[in-house]
Image (cartoon, rainbow, N blue to C red):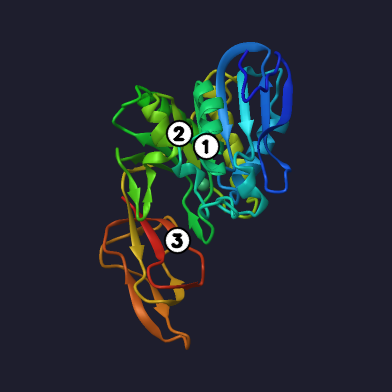
Amino acid sequence: MGRFLSVVAKPGERVCQRVRVADFSDGSPVTIPVAVLAGRRDGPVLYVQAGIHGDEHTGIDMAWRLIQDTDLEALSGTLVVLPIANPPSYLTRSRGYMLEERFLQDANRLFPGNHDGLLTERISAVLFEDFLLQADFSIDIHCPLDGSEMVCFSHVGSAQDGDGHFARREGLATAFGAPFMFYRPQHLKLGSSDMTRSLAFQAEQAKRAMIMVELGLSRTINKAASDFGVAGIGRIMQAMGMLPQEGELPRPGRRFSSIRLLHGNRGGGLRLTAPLGADVSAGQEIGTIVDAFGAPVETLVSPWDGFVMRRMTYGAIATGAEVVWIGQ
Ligand SMILES: [Zn+2]
């Protein structure tokens, strides 16, 4: 019987507890809500993490539904769910804790964390040691950055198989059923964002199996995406033998292994014409930036062949904004 930040459940029990991990400046406790659902039969431990970015409310809704709706009588093994993995960021519906000592820190760029560091580093250490390392498989749920929309995809991780779990990651990502599947190059850098201290990268270093899924919208609960995601995690649990098998496995999503970022050079109003998910070819016009009077100042052209993986949804940008990401 596993313990997850001291929370433990007996067979057939659903235990929901808040565990204090730190203090806010007014002395009130920083608590992480932990749910442990223990099936009546033995089986694997699945860890589902949502809300490491506190504005990703569609993923948080999925986690709540897994906690409330999973049938304990049908469950084999243990389902461990953190619906709000980074509570300080949830308070302000933001990607990180707004009052952090060194400005906003992204908890998903601080793994494996540090128990002697900043508040957010300490939370990352708890997530890594008390949850990821205790599980047979982990799913980290994300939603697109505020101000953008993204195709629904599963992040299979590196195809290098450094952790010895590639086939399992790929198989369970396929079971999730996302229309796109991302195979990460060994060292991924997305613009200014270095992913080597993300949970997925560090899990591979620690030889723990996990995938990420990206869906829905930030700062709001998108019902259709939440429905899709809950069903997808149900299929993963079936594929792991934790729930009785129902129906066929989905076909694998469209595979991509490279993400290229197109930045706007001018500031102004943003009119994007290429729809999310659409195929584009090198040289194709995909939008326009206009000045304060509506006159065009820049024509946005895709330099690459691929598909529109992410689109900015803000209607106004400054120079340098990532207007479109192209998947290849
Ligand atoms: Zn996220």
**Which of pointers 3 and 2 lies earlier in the amino acid sequence?**
2
Secondary element at image label 2? loop
**Which of pointers 1 and 3 lies earlier in the amino acid sequence?**
1
**Which amino acid, mark 1?**
Ser
Judging depth in this view, the residue of 64 and 187 nearest the camera is 187
Asked if residue 229 lies left or right of residue 26, the reply is left
- The residue sitting at 67% across, 23% down in the picture is 7
Task: Give the labeled residue for mark 1.
Answer: 124
Task: Give the labeled residue for mark 3.
Answer: 311
Secondary element at image label 1? helix
Q: CA distance from mark 1 to mark 2?
A: 6 Å
**Which of pointers 1 and 2 lies earlier in the amino acid sequence?**
2
Closer to the camera: disc 3 or disc 2?
2
Q: Is mark 2 within 8 Å of ligand 1?
A: no
Point out which mark residue 112 bears: 2
Q: Within 10 Å of the Cα at label 1, are there few (<14), some (14-19), or many (20+) other Cα atoms?
A: many
**Which amino acid, mark 2?**
Pro
Judging depth in this view, the residue of 34 and 244 nearest the camera is 34
- The residue sitting at 41% across, 65% down in the picture is 323
Q: CA distance from mark 3 to mark 2?
A: 30 Å
Say which quarter of the image contains residue 11. Answer: top right
- The residue sitting at 62% across, 25% down in the picture is 5
Q: Within 10 Å of the Cα at label 3, are there few (<14), some (14-19), or many (20+) other Cα atoms?
A: many
